[in-house]
Image (tube, rainbow, N blue to C red):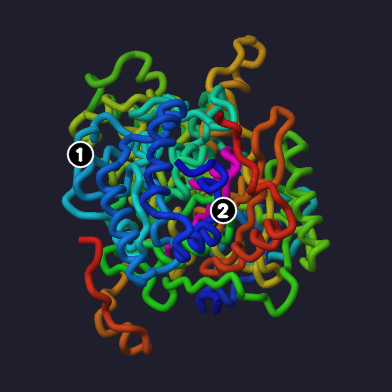
Amino acid sequence: MLSEDVLYLPIRELGEHIRTRKISPVELTESYLDRSKRLGPRFNAYVTITEDLALDQARAAEKEISGGHYRGPLHGVPYAAKDLLAVKGYETTWGAKPYADQSFDYNATVIERLNRAGAILIGKAAMIELAGGLGYESAEASLTGPCKNPWNTDYWTCGSSSGSGAIVSAGLANFALGSDTRGSIICPSTLCGISGMRPSFGRVSRHGVMAIAWSMDKIGPMARTADCCGLILSVIAGHDENDHDSLPSPLSDFHYSAAQVSPRPVRIGRLTNVFPNVDPELHAAADDALRILEQNGAKVSDVELPEGPFEEAAELVILIEAASAFSELIDSGRCAQLADPLGQINGYASREFSASDLLQIQRVRVYLQKKIDVLFDRFDVIAAPGEDTAAIPLKPPPEPARQQQQREEHLPPRNRRGNSMQPDAISSLCGLPAVTVPCGFSKGRMPIGVQFMARALDDERVIAAARLFQQHTDWHTKHPSLS
Amino acid sequence: MKKPGNLNNADEVSRREFARRVALTVAGGTLAAATLPISSKAAPRLPSIAPLLQDEDSSGLSSDAQAEVEAKLQNIFAKYGARFSDDQKKLMRRTVTSHVRMLEAIRPIPVANGDTPATVLKLIDDGISDSKGMPSRPSKEGA
């Protein structure tokens, strides 16, 4: 089996070893499979390990590369896919008991694209049931149980791309795909100490992917570095006529090269009014990250997110669209089979929204888009802590005085109160790209991160800012000790 | 990247001005026309965020909003009441109250007749993309 150091290599480096045949895709896949089978259950990271498919794909990759047909940097690289992506021949459970036996006879478009790039699917990653589409209160809201953080298994990964975060953090696969309706890539990536990217809305096809909210759902990469995210996005992006909201070419295409150099210093807006009530260490770490960027040519200045009902608009859009997306589940009463008490009833409540309310929200949404967009006349990216907390315990201590705080700490970001200016509400509602990368550790030795957001379709700018940071730091090279 | 054309003319609006616009909704202004001066130190802030799982009671809700909560609950329980336990009914009340509280933050924002919702019909791109010099319809994939 290959050493842990190899399994944690970023894609560009690993791909070069594969291209030059220093590393065999079969041996690499076997090593990740072995590690996934040994360590995956410790974290509740997988729903299914697709061992037969992975080995078939690995052997095909090895044969092609040996024959001189190298497809690119993902060729022969094993990955995991969140279990809301359809994979022919395997169950696609959406992380929920009512769909535990569900399967599709086709692949999601992103799976097809990764197949064409020669990537190797090693398993279906665990997730919060229905990706939290009908709401959830705790990490228990998953078909496979609470997903445990590889940095400390007493702590949660965050959701809803929980397994994807754990898998990459634990080196069970080289990268993973997650989905992000509101924060479901950014949060687990941050709390698991990896790099994660939510692409611009419409850039990556959702065909073959469970829908929560059609106007907000995005698919994106979770990997070791921002550069890895760029490489993956360049493969999975692009127009798909099977996704109604897919942007046309060339807007949806993403051509990525590490050699791309900005013609001028990166202009970064440091958000000063986000996460007002969080532990100061989170802001301090993000500020340190921005200082490093400034020392390396970036121009950093303070800016505030515009005020507006971004939180409410984002939440209401999700509630209303999810109630429609899961109407069969609600009609049939099978939502009672969901693990989470809120998920069991929330769909009924969400059906009470009126059409005029929906249209009002969607009309206000355009106005809110304009309000955030003007920030990017002055800045290439805006930056903030990756989350409003480091990873939280799965089982909080029982002091009564802390009951309310504990309950809220255990809520997914969508459901917390107090931190009204959460950048993920704004950026998710408006379809903006975002990247989070690790930038330190909390007092409790759990990862914390910094996130960058950009104007819609400026995906390359968030990657460029994060890459610049990672070129001058080594936080992304750190991983949990799992021996 | 060229930003979408329909956003190019967005006026930058301060937080305070935005709050004031919301406060002045009852005056019947419109988003497009609301270019009010920034002047009032007493401009109200926007309502605080009402998360889904806050321990909701109806305090702070207008009487109309409280009535709306009751009407929605009656409707839900009339249709599906047999499906819920007492605890679930309590959770339902909290949830519906939270929903209405969020709506209360959105409804007052003025919109003009021409303010289009973010959800619109998108034309099938056959032929349209060709006319813009974009690649023609790609082959099906993923199916």
Q: Residues within 10 Å of mark 1 (few under 14, many from 20)?
A: few
Residue stretch in magenta: A185-203
Q: Position of residue A60 (x, y in %)?
A: 28, 59
Which picture quadrant has residue A192? Answer: top right
Asked if A122 appears above or below B140 in the picture, the reply is: above
Asked if residue A449 lies left or right of residue A147, the reply is right
Q: Which residue is mark 2?
A: A426
In the rendered structure, the residue with mark 1 lies on which chain?
A: A
Asked if A408 appears above or below A221 in the picture, the reply is: above
Q: Residue at x 48, y 74 (%)?
A: A255
Q: Residue at x 67, y 72 (%)?
A: A377
User: Type of residue at label 1?
Assistant: Gln
Note whether residue A300 is visible: yes
Q: Position of residue A105 (x, y in %)?
A: 16, 51
Asked if A341 appears above or below A54 in the picture, the reply is: above
Q: Quick one: A154 or A171, which is closer to the camera?
A: A171
Kindly state the secondary structure of the residue where label 2 is placed.
helix
Q: Position of residue B8 (x, y in %)?
A: 58, 77
- The numbered dot on residue A102 is 1
Q: Are marks 1 and 2 in contact (CB under 8 Å)?
A: no
Earlier-in-chain disc, 1 versus 2? 1
Q: Position of residue A415 (x, y in %)?
A: 52, 34
Asked if residue A125 lies left or right of residue A157, the reply is left
User: Type of residue at label 2?
Assistant: Ile
Kindly state the secondary structure of the residue where label 1 is placed.
loop
| Image quadrant in which the N terminus of chain A is located | top left
Q: Residue at x 53, y 31 (%)?
A: A149
Instruction: Answer whether residue A194 is magenta in the image.
Output: yes
